[in-house]
Image (tube, rainbow, N blue to C red):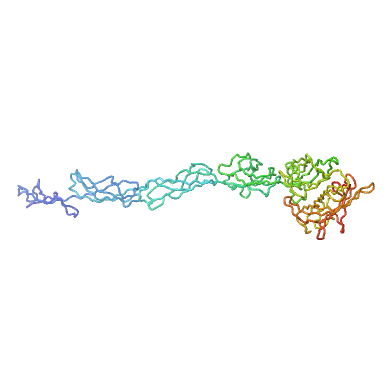
Amino acid sequence: MEDRNPATVLDFADSDHVVIVTGKIVTLAGAGLSGADAGNYVLDSVATTTADIYALHITGSFTASNKIYDATTAATITGRTLSGVLGTDVVSYVGGTANFSDKNIGNGKIVTATGLGLSGTDAGNYTVNTTATTTANITPRAITGSITAANKVYDGNTAATILTRTLGGVIAGDVVSYVGGTASFADPYVGTGKTVTATGLSLFGTDAGNYTVNATATTTANVTPYSATGTVTLSNSPWQYSDQEIFTAKLSPASIGGQSPAGYVTFSIGTQTIGTVQLQNTSGVLTGTLAYPLAQAPGSYTVKAVFSTTSIPGSGVNPNFTVGTPTTPLTVTREDARAYYAGLTFVSTSSLTSGTATVTLSATIKDITAVTGDPAYDANAGDIRKATVTFINRDTNTAIATVPVGLVSAGDTKTGTATYNWPVNIGTANSQSYTIGIIVNNYYTRNSSEDNTVVTVSKPLGEFITGGGFIVNLASSAGMLASEPGLKTNYGFNVKYNKSDTNLQGNVNIIVRSYRLPNGTRDTKLHIYQIKSTAILSLSVRKATATTPGTAQFAAKANIQDITNPAVPISVDGGVTLQMTVTDKGEPGAFDSIGFTVLNKSGGLYYSNNWTGVKTIEQLLGGGNLKVL
């Protein structure tokens, strides 16, 4: 009977054991006998038998390396270990692939390896687990975030606006964006390529947790100047020479971030600088005002306001601002003047046989500032020397001469005089009357029939009446065209019989100043009426004696015109009756007197210079002379 040594028996009862050899011959060596009767026997041989050898199950394990997030679950096996290999058997744990449980970052994440196996000379004698697990870490992937910033207009602070955000290094398909943060310039001032720093930047999105990014990023952007708004205005319109004008310049905003665009403003008219003033902050607007009497010649100009940082014109503006040069148009017109005839009104030729005479035309010219109470009065005087005077013959509308104006007093630039010696030739006529007007020009203006006067040039003849000058209107003036008290009525006349005493010849010219319309109602403006004889009706002369003055009575037909506008005379009436009485009390005429009565041909009174209620009586001359010869 065959006995099996228990030491040589392999136990394969474990179901995991795999039979690797079947019916393998087993030879027993070194067998002997034992027992109480062993001595009675001799073991002369041992028979062989067969048996199966099962593979030994051993345990394999591995280690995996930590990795940086790469959006996959792939893991790398870094070490492999077998437990249970016998003796010097040559067996290795090989093969297989390893994966994390998911792609996301984490510490101690489970890594599973599959497809593991054995290799080596003795590998066939073993079985091993083909799947194993371990742990490893997936750490965040560092990516780079960058930004761009918007350029901005200077606003006094360092705040910057992030324009775009870019991430470098994000794995395709991952949902990650660069968000948050605030950006600032290094300082608030104007500059090009200024550094902008953003802080507090972070990541957002489904896969944001798998990445790290720089929380701070820098870029560059520009801060451009703020465009401040400037204006320049004038206070009055229209603008006359010598008027006081208020120039106002405004600039807004007054400041940004403690910075003001300018501190001063310089005004100019055309190419002339007229003044620099400091700007004041008025309700958030920088304002500068300059009072300036217009010294420019009448004409069109451009007013400019130049803003600067200092009182030196053109010294520039704060570099954090741009400021334009605002302009406004200015049209300087001529200042009002008043003219007063001051020359002779009655001039004789040099002899009975001479028709030539020199008439000294003279006028006093006043800046309107010197005429208190005038409706056009203003308090800003110019220099009357900037005026010119044109004496004009209104009868023919012919300019006699244009002359300058000189001062009456060196200390008074508001009043001046103009004078011209006018050569006149009346030819064979005994006398001639001229209506003289005064036109003021250049920096001043005046052209009114109110200033007209009558100048008479006469030969020293006998047996006629002649005269020229003015009377000062009385409150007793009456009629539809009653003259204005205190103003002047000018006159000039010469009337005589012809040599055979058969016909009267001559003329009468009267200028009346009145606020009356031809219908007798009072107007708001002054009217200048001219009464000129057309046909002489009668003349009665009483020559002077040693004890009585010379007197005369005169009647004629006449026309009346409103010559307030010299260029457009208006006919009032024709064929009216003019009556005149004169008293000549000798030279120089200071005690002479005159009376005028103008009757409407339809009934009624047009004009009386001194009305008693029933008739006209004479009044003393205000200037001039009368002759009854």
The image quadrant of residue 295 is: top right
Image location of residue 561, percent across then percent down: 77, 53
Query: Count the marks: how many?
Result: 0
Q: Is residue 134 left or right of residue 416?
A: left
Residue that extends furthest to the right in the rendered view of this protein? 547
Image location of residue 93, percent across then percent down: 23, 46
Q: Do we see residue 609 in this rendering?
A: no
Residue that extends furthest to the bottom in the rendered view of this protein? 603
Q: Do we see residue 158 in this rendering?
A: yes
- Residue 376 versus residue 132: which sits nearer the camera? 376
Q: Is residue 555 left or right of residue 292?
A: right
Image location of residue 403, percent across then percent down: 75, 41
Q: Is residue 544 left or right of residue 398?
A: right
- Residue 213 versus residue 571: which sits nearer the camera? 571
Image location of residue 605, percent across then percent down: 82, 58
- Residue 489 versus residue 104: which sits nearer the camera? 489
Q: Is residue 412 left or right of residue 500?
A: left
